[in-house]
Every structure is written in structure tokens, then in C-alpha cells.
Amino acid sequence: MKLGISLVLGLLLSFSVMAQKAQNLALTPPMGWNSWNTFGTDINEQLVKDIADAFVKLGLKDAGYEYIVLDDGWMAMERDDNYNLVPHPDKFPNGMKEVVDYVHSKGLKFGIYNCAGATTCAGYPGSRGFEYIDAKLYAEWGVDFLKYDWCDTENLNAKGAYQTMRDALQASGRPILFSICEWGDNEPWKWGEEMGHMWRVTGDIINCWDCTVGHGTWASLGVWPIIKLRKDIRKYSGPGHWNDFDMMEVGNGMTPAEDRVHFAMWAMLASPLIMGNDLRSASDETIKTLTNKEVIAINQDALGIQAYCHTNEGDMEVWAKPLANGEWAIAFINMGQKPLQLDFDWAWHPVKDDLSGREMSVNTIEYTIRDAYAHKDRGTTKVNLKGEIGAHDIMLLRLTPKKE
């Protein structure tokens, strides 16, 4: 009976719209905050309001962050008599609409979580068989973003399951950003552009530089295992459709230098910048990193081209990202445990991106160099780039063709 109602409603609504994802969303990588990394299912109404207040107070809204996404655990264990999801009465005593309205009152957008399976990863009611009912409810609440997970999905086809929810969101009549979270198991980068606006390319992140933590049938990955896990997927990423390297762990226990590398690499990879820390107690250093507008500008570049590893020699990795207007972002990362002395001859290290065909022609064009973390100029490409990079730290540069 439940499945029948959802199916009939879906068929009626789908006939009235052309099936497609919401257009003109996520033209640059989405920026926001998600509750899962720090709070798990221990979430409530006051937490969401406090985070919304922190967005404004700490300058995060001004820096470009806009989505506050409530992850797993927001709903009661049973649907109501009309098969609608019900906000957990103890966590959200005033209902979800009030929470959404509060977030909107701050000039921000609200996101919510569910799962393609019968239950969510934490065991709450999933959307399987209720896709159109749930999408309609989200639209009524004013939801702007849906993170859609992949637990309890036995016998489901991933592409088909995400297509069903995509169509349900479209039928709801509200433009909702659709975040596909099936962990890269079914190569979503090959079909995700048609279905959603961003897709996870890995399993869950964990707050470490280079580690893998097993959980039986799956494992959490540190920053560098995530970066290095997928090969040849950068061609699938671009405006309106992004490879998602997971929510960030900036401020969750790594060193300030490692946080800088983490944040910069997510910017270079054109990944959504979704914070995962407790903003209410974040240090000044963490907020300084997260609100660095020069780094954010690299992530939000209009071209939307994902960076590639240019060289990897010893403890030094160099990553390059083509930017609009002939500019480039270049990241020098010290992977080692000791400070590293840099002496980089631009002429001897030609930078060319085979995917986009873009080339940094230092022999014919002089580029000015801007250090995104030091907030200072570093000369031009006519001379060698010199400096010291600390252990597990980064020098992130923006190169601009010099005007004659």
C-alpha cells in the first residue's frame, strides 16, 4: 500500500514535468556546513540555529558559505499516517519548518539528508518507495539541498535510484541541489551529471593527514588517501556537476599546516567546500583558514577545472589548476616531516594541462605571483621561486599574466 501510493503520486507528478535536475545551481562548487563529521546523529534545533548565527558572526557567510546541511538522525523512527517523515520530537520540538525559516532569515540556505535505501545509515526511515512523498515534503519546508546516501540498498540500481529521486525533486516544483552520496562504488562521475549537482567519489573522510581506518566492511580515509584514490575522473567535473571529495575536517584535530593543505587541495580539486567542524568553538586559526578569500576564489573559479598533479619528486608535490582569464593556481606541498627549501625554475618546469589544452607559457608571457596564504606578492616567473615550506604545509600561488 505504501509503495503503491508513492508510485501513483510519482507517476502523476512526473507527467507534468520534463525529468531533469534543477538547472542553474552549483555553477561553482557549493559551499556550506554539514553536521555529520562532528555531531553524528546528536543534532537538534538549537545546534542548527547556533551554526546559522556563527555563519554570520564569523564572516563565513561573507566568505561565500551558504548551505547548512542537517545530516542523518533528524527524523523520528516512524512515518506519520500519511507516510510523511516526522522530525524527531525531542530534537526538533517546533518542527522542521521553523528551523528552515530561521536559516533562511539569515540569508542562508538549508539542506537535509536521506537515503536511497529502506533505512538510513543510522537506521532511520529511508526514502525507498517514498521518493515523491519525501521530495514534496522537503519542498513544502523550503529545503534547498538534499544529501542522498546509499545504505540499505540491496538489489537497487544506483543510477536508477538516483534518477527516481532526481525526478521526484523536479516534480516537487522547488529547485533543490541534489548531492549524490553513494561513495563512488558505482562510478557516479560517469552518470552523475545527468542526475545531480555533486557526487561523492570516496567513502567517509576521517581527520588525519595520511591514514586508513577500517570499520569491518568499509574504511574511513584520511586527506591524502582520498586525494589519491581516484584516477582520471577530473574530466567529469565542471560547472553544475562536481566531484565531491567529502566534507572537510579542517578544525577537527589536524595541525594548522595540515588544515591549510586540506583546505587548499579541496579548492584546487574544485570540490564542494563543506565544513564539518563545530563552528561554535572553532579557533581563530581555523576560521582564518576557512575564510581565506584568496583560496576560496581558486575553488570558485568560473572555469571549474579540477587540478592535476604536475610533479611528484621526493617530499614535494606540485599541483596545477587552470583558471579563467589565462591565470593559474599552483600548489607546492611538502609531504615530509621536515621543512623543505624551494628553488623552482619556471622555465625548466613547463606547465601544461592535457585535459583542457591550457599551457602556462612562461617563455613568452611573464606572470605575476600571488601567495594566497601569505597574502603577499612573490615577484614574477622571470626568476626562480624561492622559499621555505614547513612540514606538511603548502605554498599556494595564483599566477596572472602580466599586463604590458
Image (tube, grey):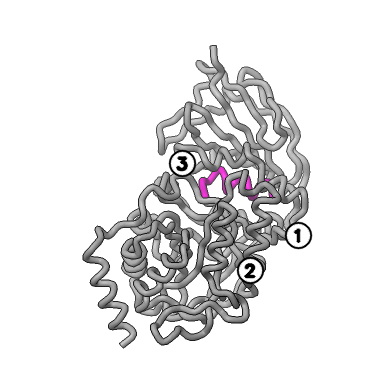
Quick check: marks 2 and 3 in contact, CB under 8 Å? no
In the current view of this chain or complex, which residue is farthest to the top? 404
Question: x, y (%) of residue 235?
Answer: 40, 45
Q: Nearer the viewer, residue 347 or 233?
A: 233
What is the crowding at mark 2: few (fewer than 14 residues within 10 Å), some, or many (at least 20)? few
Question: x, y (%) of residue 246?
Answer: 55, 58
Residue at 66%, 45% in the rendered image: 291
Helix, strand or loop: magenta stretch: helix
Task: Tell me if residue 159 can be seen.
Answer: no
Q: Secondary structure at mark 2?
A: strand
Q: Secondary structure at mark 1?
A: helix
Q: Nearer the viewer, mark 1 or mark 3?
A: 1
Mark positioned earlier in the residue sequence (1 or 2) = 2
> What span is in magenta?
259-271
Quadrant in which the C terminus appears: top right
Q: Which residue is mark 2?
A: 213
> Residue 189, relative to residue 4: is it above or below?
above
Residue at 27%, 68% in the rendered image: 13
Per the image, is 136 magenta? Answer: no
Q: Which residue is mark 1?
A: 281
Mark positioned earlier in the residue sequence (1 or 3) = 1
What is the crowding at mark 3: few (fewer than 14 residues within 10 Å), some, or many (at least 20)? many
Query: Where is residue 70, by image quadrant?
Result: bottom right
